[in-house]
């Protein structure tokens, strides 16, 4: 079961990467970007987290310790969370359309999206990716995966706060109202 569940999560992440790469060519022109230092931090944290999740580089000692048993239920639960998270992230990506960017930016003619997955949480791409990472950590069952998940929770929260500063400057009261009405990462909670 372990081989099958790990393969299926890897295929789900590969599909995600293909969709993300193809859709990256449809964005509006950028008018404002996050500072380069913030971007470097983001890329480094993502690299470390995904290395912890997928690379054998960190699969040593305590990081390799198992936190769940190797059962079919655990494997399929992890796959379900991974796929659900990736589907949410892709839905959100297509719903936001040409305003999307992998980095914190404002686009030419930027619009505020409050429908679809953005009516559930303000940052549904991050929510979906966190769910997918948690699912993948469950499939691998290693402590390193849990650390990767924790790193990404902190990083995507940090990045979302920067995005929100841009949105408040751009949309002012409209965004503040949206922020009061819709939670950031976890529906009805946070």
Image: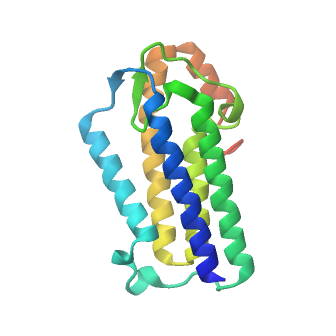
Q: What percent of the width, then of the height, locates residue 51? A: 38, 66
Asked whether 122 or 108 is in front, the reply is 108
Label total for image: 0
Q: Is residue 46 left or right of residue 16?
A: left
Q: Quadrant of residue 177?
A: top right
Q: Quadrant of residue 32?
A: top left
Colouring scheme, one of rainbow, by chain, secondary structure, one colour: rainbow
* Camera sees residue 63: yes
Quick one: quadrant of the N terminus?
bottom right
Quick one: quadrant of the C terminus?
top right
Extreme residue in the right direction: 73
Q: Is residue 132 above or below residue 1?
A: above
Q: Is residue 180 left or right of residue 25?
A: right
Q: Is residue 39 left or right of residue 110?
A: left
Taking the spot 38% from the left edge, 84% from the top edge, the residue there is: 60
* Camera sees residue 185: no
Asked whether 139 or 173 is in front, the reply is 139
Extreme residue in the left direction: 37
Q: What percent of the width, then of the height, locates residue 107? A: 43, 20
Taking the spot 45% from the left edge, 52% from the top edge, the residue there is: 154
Taking the spot 48% from the left edge, 20% from the top edge, the residue there is: 168
Q: What percent of the width, then of the height, locates residue 86? A: 61, 52
Asked whether 142 or 190 is in front, the reply is 142
Q: Is residue 33 above or below residue 189?
A: above
Q: Is residue 53 above or below residue 21?
A: below
Q: Is residue 179 above or below residue 24?
A: above
Q: What percent of the width, then of the height, locates residue 100? A: 49, 31
Q: Is residue 72 left or right of residue 19?
A: right
Taking the spot 44% from the left edge, 21% from the top edge, the residue there is: 28
């Amino acid at each position: 079961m372990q081989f099958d569940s790990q393969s299926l999560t890897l295929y789900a992440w590969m599909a995600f990467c293909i969709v993300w790469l193809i859709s990256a060519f449809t964005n509006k022109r950028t008018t404002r970007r996050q500072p380069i230092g913030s971007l470097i931090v983001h890329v480094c944290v993502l690299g470390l987290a995904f290395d912890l999740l997928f690379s054998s580089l960190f699969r040593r000692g305590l990081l390799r310790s198992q936190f769940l048993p190797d059962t079919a239920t655990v494997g399929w639960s992890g796959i379900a969370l991974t796929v659900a998270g990736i589907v949410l992230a892709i839905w959100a990506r297509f719903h936001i359309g040409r305003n999307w960017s992998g980095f914190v930016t404002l686009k030419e003619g930027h619009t505020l999206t409050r429908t679809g997955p953005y009516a559930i949480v303000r940052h549904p791409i991050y929510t979906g990716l966190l769910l997918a990472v948690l699912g993948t950590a469950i499939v691998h069952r290693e402590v390193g995966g849990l650390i990767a998940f924790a790193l990404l929770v902190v990083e995507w929260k940090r990045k979302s706060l920067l995005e929100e500063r841009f949105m408040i400057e751009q949309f002012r009261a409209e965004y503040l109202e949206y922020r009061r009405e819709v939670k950031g990462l976890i529906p009805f909670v946070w």
